[in-house]
Image (cartoon, helix red, strand yellow):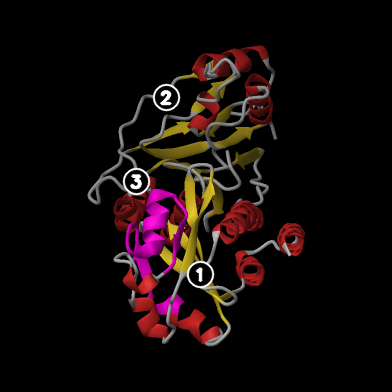
């Protein structure tokens, strides 16, 4: 007789181990929590002989446990719907909350007499909990949730063997949940990657094709975001009288938010161009247009804006918080008097002043953002103004811009760009 009972017990243990192995193999192939949790609960009910099983996941932001899956052989899917909508437990509340807070398993032989028992769930579903086994789902010290089995069908209450096997299932569940979360995170990252690549292609449409200016004048420009998209912008806009409006601007910050501000600024500038003949008045109007948008979101933008005449080589320009352009004449770099003018988005009543220079054949003017001057190498050294001047002095031109960009890239080496980089050059040659 004793031998039969021993064999029966060993057979039961072997069966449960097979179920555990089966669960491990089954859960390994499920990638999302939506499919994982019902499968886990079905296996748990089978191996413990329970009428019902439930799994609550911990929400660290709100510090509560929420029903994520329920299996009930009497109420079926109805119990799942009710509990997910109507019930959540604070840490320490109910038996499940106590288990989560203390990170200890608990086996309750008579749930109705336990002071920690949360009766609202039974009341909502119509289920009567007689006994239950509640196990924490842990990943290291991190609490992921709890798993419950309710009402043993083949004995008065759950025993130590039930607890031991359920704890093993909880360990499997923890690994599966973490794996599922990692997969979901990877999918989100892949989705974001696709969206960023699309945003980068869309932003590239803002960069104009550099036109033939005529009269022996030429232009070249490039903008390279530090990330997928950035906040630098430039434009070359033809005017009815044959002149060209040109500008380079730098929106504070970088990434998607800066790119959206960049797009808005580009649109506002183009809409104001036909209404103003003088660059200082144009910039004042643009600043008023974008002030509310920028100030509300905490952004500002620096800008250098010019009106260039290919016929004469004259360029009228104004600054808004941007550093002056570099003029390169036959005798080297010429210094433009520093002009004051605050960045766009700082004050709606900002005023700007203008200046004017004339390019002779063989001369050039460079506009740039601080992605050039503040480019860093692997030793965290800045490229700086001195290296710009050194490059110009040792190089024949015009043009100088494209070569300067290569010089900056060589200086940076393996160091990732720390800011968006934009460079524009206008130069004249003998006709």
The answer for how far apart the CA atoms under marks 2 and 1 are is 89 Å
| Label 2 Cα neighbours within 10 Å, binned few <14 / some 14-19 / many ≥20 | few
Is 175 magenta? The answer is no
| Label 3 Cα neighbours within 10 Å, binned few <14 / some 14-19 / many ≥20 | many
Q: Which residue is mark 2?
A: 336
In the picture shown, does residue 325 fall above or below 387? Answer: below
Q: Which residues are magenta?
A: 83-109
| Label 1 Cα neighbours within 10 Å, binned few <14 / some 14-19 / many ≥20 | some
Helix, strand or loop under label 1: loop
Q: Which residue is mark 3?
A: 344
Helix, strand or loop under label 2: loop
Task: Tell whether 100 sits left or right of 295.
Answer: right
Q: Say whether disc 3 or disc 1 marks the residue closer to the N-terminus.
A: 1
The answer for how far apart the CA atoms under marks 3 and 2 are is 22 Å
Query: x, y (%) of residue 187?
Result: 65, 57
Query: x, y (%) of residue 232?
Result: 51, 43
**Can you see residue 298?**
yes
């Amino acid at each position: 007789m004793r031998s039969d009972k021993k064999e029966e017990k060993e057979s039961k243990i072997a069966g449960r181990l097979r179920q555990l192995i089966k669960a491990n193999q089954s859960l390994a192939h499920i990638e999302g929590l939506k499919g994982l949790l019902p499968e886990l609960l079905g296996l748990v009910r089978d191996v413990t002989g329970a009428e019902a099983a439930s799994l609550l996941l911990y929400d660290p932001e709100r510090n509560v446990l929420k029903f994520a899956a329920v299996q009930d052989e009497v109420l079926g899917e109805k119990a799942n719907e009710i509990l997910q909508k109507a019930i959540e437990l604070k840490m320490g509340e109910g038996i499940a909350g106590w288990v989560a807070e203390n990170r200890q398993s608990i086996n309750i032989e008579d749930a109705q007499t336990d002071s920690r028992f949360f009766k609202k769930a039974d009341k909502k579903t119509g289920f009567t909990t007689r006994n239950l086994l509640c196990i924490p789902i842990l990943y290291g010290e991190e609490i992921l949730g709890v798993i419950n089995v309710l009402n043993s069908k083949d004995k008065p209450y759950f025993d130590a063997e039930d607890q031991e096997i359920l704890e093993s299932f909880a360990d499997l569940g923890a690994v599966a949940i973490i794996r599922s979360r990692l997969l979901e995170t990877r999918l989100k990252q892949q989705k974001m990657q696709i969206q960023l690549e699309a945003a980068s292609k869309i932003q590239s449409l803002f960069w104009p094709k550099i036109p033939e200016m005529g009269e022996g004048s030429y232009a070249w420009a490039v903008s390279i975001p530090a990330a997928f998209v950035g906040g630098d912008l430039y434009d070359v806009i033809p005017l009815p009288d044959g002149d060209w409006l040109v500008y380079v601007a730098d929106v504070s910050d970088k990434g998607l938010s800066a790119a959206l501000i960049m797009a808005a600024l580009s649109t506002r500038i183009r809409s104001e161009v036909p209404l103003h003949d003088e660059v200082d008045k144009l910039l004042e109007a643009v600043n008023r247009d974008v002030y509310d948008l920028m100030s509300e979101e905490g952004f500002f933008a620096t800008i250098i804006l010019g009106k260039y005449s290919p016929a004469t080589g004259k360029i009228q320009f104004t600054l808004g918080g941007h550093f002056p352009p570099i003029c390169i004449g036959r005798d080297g770099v010429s210094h433009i008097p520093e002009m004051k003018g605050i960045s766009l988005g700082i004050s709606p009543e900002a005023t700007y002043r203008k200046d004017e220079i004339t390019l002779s054949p063989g001369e050039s003017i460079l506009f740039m953002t601080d992605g050039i001057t503040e480019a860093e190498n692997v030793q965290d050294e800045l490229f700086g103004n001195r290296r710009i001047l050194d490059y110009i002095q040792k190089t024949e031109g015009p043009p100088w811009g494209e070569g300067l960009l290569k010089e900056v890239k060589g200086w940076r080496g393996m160091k990732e760009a720390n800011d968006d980089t934009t460079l524009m050059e206008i130069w004249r040659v003998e006709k």
